[in-house]
Image: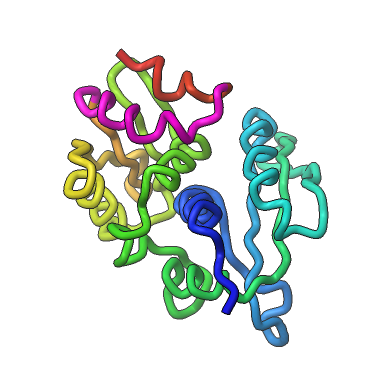
Amino acid sequence: MIVLPIYVKSVIVGILLSDGNLSLAKPRFAENPHLTFKQGLNNSKYVLLVYSILAHYCNVYPSLVKSVRKNKVSYALYFRTRGLPYLNELRSLFYIENYVEKEIPEDIYNILNPVALAHIIMGDRSANKFGLIIYTDSYKIIDVVRLINVLKIRYNIDSTLRFHTPSQLRIYIRQRSMPILRVLVKPHITESMLYKIINVY
């Protein structure tokens, strides 16, 4: 049986925890999910980095996509992999029964390694001088609490739950835990994005 290399799987776990998705091109006929990933042009370097890691599993190059929201035009960079049988395992972990809504896997303790954590930070976070915020807007409170607990139990990273809106939750990593976080993820963060973990006092 063919399996994903551990590093590649860790990268995918990280982007699934942020903006990545697993879906079927034709749900009635396709058997294997493909990974889709899209981010705004301001994060295009990161999209290209992820593509360079996953290019072996893709059959098309990243493409520019346009969207209009509230009469405002924006552009993003998008790519997807081929339908791959070894993505079924991750799909069963990250999606509830309808395979539409994502959840934080119950097994997140074992799969949230430093590589995955680095890709959460590169792809979906905001830093300030007081700490770092991880965007978990699309997850339920039980999922976000599960992730907070794993950060503390596995890595001794202190974080709290914050409401961005009444229905959108985010994780705030406390300033005092930033040195621990830097040691964990710095070897796996591309040089152009080191500012995301260094420019925090």
Residue 179 image position (x, y, % from top left): 27, 24
For the N terminus, the image quarter is bottom right
Q: Tell me the residue at 44%/39% (across/down).
A: 118
Residue 88 horizontal side relative to residue 137, left or right: right
- In the displayed structure, would residue 143 be above or below residue 183? below
The quadrant holding residue 177 is: top left
Magenta span: chief secondary structure = helix
Q: Tell me the residue at 32%/46% (across/down).
A: 166
Residue 163 horizontal side relative to residue 37, left or right: left
Q: Tell me the residue at 55%/70% (across/down).
A: 3
Residue 199 horizontal side relative to residue 78, left or right: left
For the C terminus, the image quarter is top left
Q: Residue furthest bottom?
A: 28
| Camera-side residue of 66 and 28 | 28
| Camera-side residue of 133 and 184 | 184
Q: Is residue 128 magenta?
A: no
| Camera-side residue of 70 and 13 | 13
Q: Tell me the residue at 25%/45% (across/down).
A: 151
- In the displayed structure, would residue 29 be above or below residue 166? below
Residue 160 image position (x, y, % from top left): 21, 39
Q: Identify the magenta region.
A: 175-191
